[in-house]
Image (tube, rainbow, N blue to C red):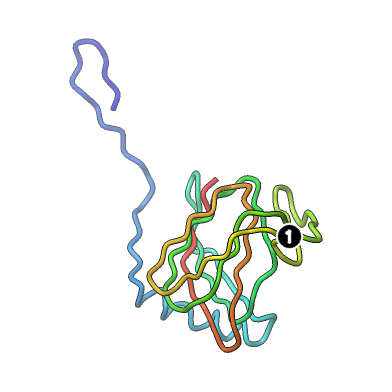
Amino acid sequence: MLLSMGASPQVMTSNQTSELWTPAKLLEQAQHLRQLAAKGDGSASEKLEDYPHHYTMLAFRSRSGGAELHENFTDLFYILEGHGTLVTGGAVADAKTTAPGEIRGSSVKGGASREFKTGDVVHIPAGVPHQMLLGDGETVTYFVVKIG
């Protein structure tokens, strides 16, 4: 809110619009990601919206992923459907820079493993190695907020 001496308060408004995504709508929207993953490497995602300091994504995975480390982005996942194990911390094995601030590798070594399931929210701070592991036949669909 901006105030000047002797003037009434002015409220600043944003040109941004708000979004409401229900789990059912996101799962419906993710059906095509399931098809893309089946035709590709078992993983597919799409960006939903861009905002000034973050963006949102929808992701589907039917296989374990490699290790990741985002130097400039915090990941916030909402697990819409599925089950798996998240490994965080430790170090990225066979680390390679794939883009500015983005490191990928074969696995996370020395990290802590925790199970996740439908309804869980996962917070991974920038700079923390992480890897999503799925057992045979497991899949996961999740909503992602990339905060930078």
Q: How many marks?
A: 1
**Image point 72% across, 65% down: which residue?**
107
Q: Position of residue 21 (x, y in %)?
A: 35, 67
Instruction: Sort mark 1 into few (<14), some (14-19) or many (20+) by Cα contacts within 10 Å.
Output: many
Q: Is residue 4 above or below residue 42?
A: above
Q: Which residue is mark 1?
A: 104
Q: Position of residue 32 (x, y in %)?
A: 53, 82
Residue found farthest to the top: 5
**Horizontal side, residue 97 vs residue 74: left or right:** right
**Image point 41% across, 74% down: which residue?**
118
Label 1 sits on what residue type?
Arg
Q: Position of residue 5 (x, y in %)?
A: 24, 10
**Horizontal side, residue 72 vs residue 92: left or right:** left
**Image point 54% across, 54% down: which residue?**
124
**Quarter of the rendering occupied by the N terminus:** top left
**Image point 81% across, 61% down: which residue?**
94
Q: Position of residue 88 (x, y in %)?
A: 60, 58
**Residue closest to the eye, 136 or 11:** 136
**Quarter of the rendering occupied by the C terminus:** top right
Q: Is residue 64 above or below residue 130?
A: below
